[in-house]
Image: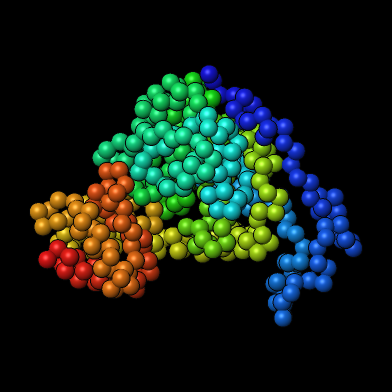
Amino acid sequence: MAFNLLQLVRENIRTLEPYRCARDDFKEGILLDANENTHGPALESISTWEQALELNRYPDPHQIELKEQIAAFRNALPNKYLDDYEQNKLTPQNLCLGVGSDESIDMLMRCVCSPGKDKLLICPPTYGMYSICATVNDVQMVKVPLTLPDFEVDVAGVLDAVTKDSTIKLVYLTSPGNPTAKLLSVDGIVELLKSAEEKWNGLVIVDEAYIDFTLSDDPRKSLSVSTLVNEYPNLVVMQTLSKSFGLAGIRLGITYSSKELSGYLNAMKYPYNISSLTSAVASRSTAPGTGLEVMKKFVNEIISQRAVVLSELQKLPGVGRNIGGLDANFILIEILDKDGVPSNEVANKLYNKLAVENGVVVRFRGKEPNCTGALRVSIGTVEENKILVDKFAKCLLEVRG
């Protein structure tokens, strides 16, 4: 069956009327219609910034200005496959904002998957929240592992799975991957989108949490596929301000999709899911010329340090390959035993010794498919990275004997 959004979306979602908010009708005047506390916030003192946010009032449920700002940022560097920029560039109507990407993951399942009946497809090793949300929503999982040794999407394998099983409604891809730090081939993603659209009624979701840490050969183009959602109606892209923008604490996720699908998602979301504080901070960080420049500066520093950390760690006896890519703010390295073989036992001992005795916390990922002996190491500041390398050398020597 070819792609048909109207048939894909669950009937109860298709007929859902979005919650109508008090501020949809009147934004100014003596506002006594929403049962808000008109005396203001219960704070001993209020800063000028807090006062301007009117924290006693419900937040803007639509976030149009913030969406315009985010869309403009992504439109400035379109993907090379965007054929008609003026016709298909992003608009606020393509965006739905959520409480981190996790809300988007959950909302997409509820939008198209009937509990106890439908399935989703993942490509391990991958982000763990897909399986958690699937379990919560009673959605079965099908797995088509990433290919080895390059952790690339198996386009033929995914197409074979979805065309043979019409109950698969979603395909989740992480690009760059977590824990792989590997950017999936944009050519492969577009090939999958084109082929799937003709044969399968489902959505390909690309999770781009780490996309800003990738390096494009063409500075005028982005490796993000977010600008392609108007050309490929079966494409959904998720991003976040948690990584490159350094705003994990405000919990803001962004979902890009066709205007039709975005309309369903915005009708589904809780009306006040994005707080005034979150929206204000996000607006500052995505503002052109100010917040965006700070973000780019930090990203460039992380990319530079990524190469330094990998180089220094790989000088140590017992550190093997970087088994993933170099497209995120972390690396995925093998820890070897005395015989030079990747070892979960040694990696786990090293992880515990670093954390418990030395206060340096990395992540053990050896139980992920094709990640035996792997530690995931986030890239810190210059000083943090120096301490990391020193402690790593000391602890690795001790655990290997």
Residue 328 lies left or right of residue 388; in this view the side is right
At x 36% / y 60%, what residue is drawn?
378
Which of the pair 257/375 is nearer the observer? 375
Query: Which of 304/142 is in front?
Result: 142
Front residue of this view, candidates 61 and 108: 108
Res 113 → quadrant: top right
Q: Is residue 274 above or below residue 233?
A: below
Hey, which residue is sitting farthest top in the picture?
Answer: 1
Return the x and y of residue 397 as percentages of the image width and height: 16, 67
Q: Is residue 352 left or right of residue 300?
A: left
Q: Position of residue 138 (x, y in %)?
A: 52, 38
Q: Residue at x 66, y 37 (%)?
A: 264
Across and down, in percent, residue 287 comes to 61, 59
One can see residue 72 in this view: no
Does 346 sit left or right of 112 as displayed? Answer: left
| Residue at the image point whose x is 30% and y is 43% from the top | 369
Looking at the image, the residue that sits furthest to the left is 339
Horizontal side of 17 relative to 113 (left or right) equals right
